[in-house]
Image (tube, grey):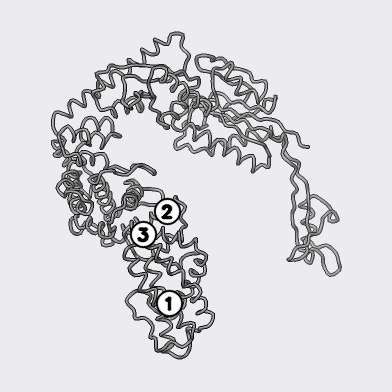
Amino acid sequence: MDATSDLLVEIGTEELPPTALLSLSNAFAECFRNQLEAAGVCFETIEPFASPRRLALLVRGILTRQPDREILRRGPAVQAAFGPDGHPTKAALGFAGSCGVPLDALARETTDKGEWLAFRSTVPGATTASLVPGLTEAALAGLPIPKRMRWGDGTEEFVRPVHWVCLLLGTEAIPGRILGIEAGRQTHGHRFHHPEPMNLPEATEYPELLRSRGSVEPDFKRRRDLILRQVEELASANGLHARIDEALLDEVTALVEWPSAILGHFDAIYLAIPPEVLIETMQSNQKYFPLEDASGTLQASFIAVTNIESRDPDQVRAGNERVIRPRFADAAFFWAQDLKQPLEGYAARLETVVFQDRLGTLAEKSARVASLARHLAPTLGVDPDLAARAARLSRCDLVTSMVYEFPSLQGTMGRYYALHANEDPCVSAAMEEQYLPRFAGDVLPANSCGRVLAIADRIDTLVGIFGIGLRPTGAKDPYGLRRASIGVLRILIESPLELDLRELIARAASAYPAGLLSKDVESAALAYVLDRLRGYYQERGVSADTVEAVLQTGVTIPADLDARITAVTAFRTLSGSTSLAAANKRIRNILSKAGIDIGAGHPGPNAQLLQDPAEMRLAAKVEELSSLVGPLAEARDYIGVLGLLAGLEGDLDAFFDQVMVMIDDSDVRENRIRLLRSLVGLFLLVADISRLQ
C-alpha cells in the first residue's frame, strides 16, 4: 500500500483585501487541487484556511510519492522497419538508438491500423515533497487577482507582500522558495497577542496550534460563526436585535483573526436622520452591526467586532463611539442642508449633469422618461400626471449632498425628500421603487407608479444606448443593459402587466431627435430583451427548447409568452407530447420542401378532395378542434388549447402511416398540404412544438 501523509501549505502575507479573502481561499484550494490531479498525486481531502494574514491548505491523506508512469513510444510501422530480406532499416535502427536500447529490446504493438515497433519504459514517480514548491507556485499564479503588486527588490508579484511560507509534509519541513521566500516550518500567530514565530511540529497540528497559542481562528467558517454568535448573544443580552447583513458579516470575518464583539452607543439625537443613512454609515464605513428593537426600529447602539481581546474594553468601546460621532454629524448636516428646498428645487441642476454625451443631460432623460411614463400610466391604472411628475423628480436626489456622500442611497433619499415636500404618496414611493429590482432575486416595485417609472426608465436607457451603437458585448456592459432588460421582463411577467415590448420600444425611440438613433434600433433592442428570456427561464429550470418554441410565435408581450411557456411545459408531461412534436417536425419539413408558407390566413382543405379514410378522420378532427381552441387561445387558456390538441395523436399517427402527401395528383397533394398547414396553425396558437427535442 502506498504511503500517505498530511501536507500543510501556508502563505503568510500582509493584510489581504477583505472583500476578496473568501474567493481567494476557495480559488487557492481549487487551483492546488488541479495541480495535484495533473501531477497524478492522489489525496483524500483539502481543507482551506483563510484569515487576514494568511492563506493555507491542509491536504489530508496525500501520497508521499508520485506514482510511477509507463511511457509508450511508437516507432515506425513494421513494414517500414524491415526490408524484404528481413534486415532492419535505418528507420528501425534510428528509433532503437533514440530509445537507448538495442533493436531486439523493442516490442511490437498491433492496432487497427497495423503493426508498429514500440518501446515501453517506466518513469519513477517523484517525491511529493519535491513537487510541492512548484505546484504551490503554479496554484498561486492561477488565483483571480486583478492587480498584483511587487515589494522589496524582487520581481515576485502577489495580491499583498508575502512575509513567510510554511510547507510541511507530516513532520518534515519541505525546502523550497515560494514568491521569493524560503519555506520553513514556522507560522505566525496574532499580530499583537502572539507576534513571535511558532514552530509547527506536524502539519495536522496547524489549526489547533494557532487557536491555542497563536490567538488566531484560521478557519473562515468557524470564525464567521463565532462572530455571528457573539453579535447575536451580545445584542440579546441588551434586549436588542442585531441587523445582520451577510456581505458585511463576510467582510468582518475577513478583517479579524481573533474576534471580540463590543457594544457601543451614539447620541440618540441622530435618530432623527433617516435610519438608512445611519445604517449605511455603520455598515459601509465602520463595519458595525446596527441594533434594532423588537419592532425593527433602529436604536442608538451598535456592535463592533474588534481584532483583539483588550484588557480595557471600555477604552476600545470609547474609541469606536468617538469615530462614529463625526460621521453622523456630517450626515445630520447634509440632511439639514438638503431639506432647505423641496425635491423639485434640484431639477435645475440636472441640466448640468450629462447622462451620456450623445444622449444629453439627466434633465433631458427625465423628460423622455416622463413622456413614456405618461403613455404607460393608463394601462397600469396610474394617473398620467402623477406618473409624469414622478419621472421629472426621479433623478433630483442625485444632486443632493446626501446622495453625493452616499451614492448607494439614491432613490431612498429621493423618497424621503419627496415625502418631506408633501408629494403624492404614489410619487414618493416611486422615487425608491424605480430602481427595483436591483439584482437577481430582488423584490419588484409594489407601487403602480413605481412600476411605471421602473419600466420607462430602463426602456429609455436601452433604446438610447442601443441607438448610438454602444451595445453590450460578451465582456462589457457598462450601462447595465442586461440587468435592465431582465428587470423589465421580471416586472412585466411577475406582476403581470399586459404591455407589448415592441410597442414600448417604438414609443421610447420616438422621443429621441430624428436621425440620432440607428435605423435598426427597435428591432435590435427588442431582440436583445427577448434573448434575455432564455437565461431568465433557464434559472427556473425551463428547458431552452420550450422557450425557443414559444418565441417562434413572434409574440412580444412577456406576460403572454410566460403563459405559453407554462402551457408548453405542462404539455411536455403528457404521454403523446413527444409523438406530436415529432409529427409537427415532420409536417414542417414537408411544407418547407414544398416551399409552403406556414403563416395564418390560408384556406383549409377541400372536403371534396379528401380520399383516404385516415385523412378524412384527421380533417374532421382538425375542423372540430378549430372551433374549440380558438376561444381558449383568445382567453389565454393555452394549457386548455394544448390539452385538446393532444387528442390529435392517434389520428395524426394513422395519417402518416396510411397517407402519402406528396403524390402526383396536384389537387389532392395541395389539399393534403392545406390540411397539414391547418393542423400546424392550431399548435401555433400556442407555440411551434416542432422545436421541442
Which amino acid does the dot numbered 2 rest on?
A: Tyr
Q: Earlier in the sequence, mark 3 or mark 2?
A: 2
Label 1 Cα crowd, 10 Å radius (few <14 / some 14-19 / many 20+): some
**Residue placed most toward the observer, 502 or 102:** 502
Q: Quick check: can you spot residue 152?
A: no
Q: Could you tell me residue 264's position as x and y percent?
A: 36, 16
The residue to which callout 2 is attached is 537
Q: Could you tell me residue 223's position as x and y percent?
A: 51, 25
* Quarter placement of the N terminus: top right
Q: Could you tell me residue 542's position as x and y percent?
A: 45, 55
**Residue placed most toward the observer, 16 or 5:** 5
Which quadrant of the structure image shows residue 604? Answer: bottom left
**344 lies above or below 18:** below
- Residue furthest top as drawn: 312
Residue occupying the point 36% across, 23% down: 291
Q: Earlier in the sequence, mark 3 or mark 1?
A: 3
**Whole-number angstrom distance, CA of label 3 to CA of label 2:** 11 Å
Give the number of the disc on residue 242.
none
**Whole-number angstrom distance, CA of label 3 to CA of label 1:** 27 Å
**294 lies above or below 463:** above
Give the number of the disc on residue 561.
3
The residue to which callout 1 is attached is 621
Which amino acid does the dot numbered 3 rest on?
A: Leu
The secondary element bearing badge 2 is classed as helix
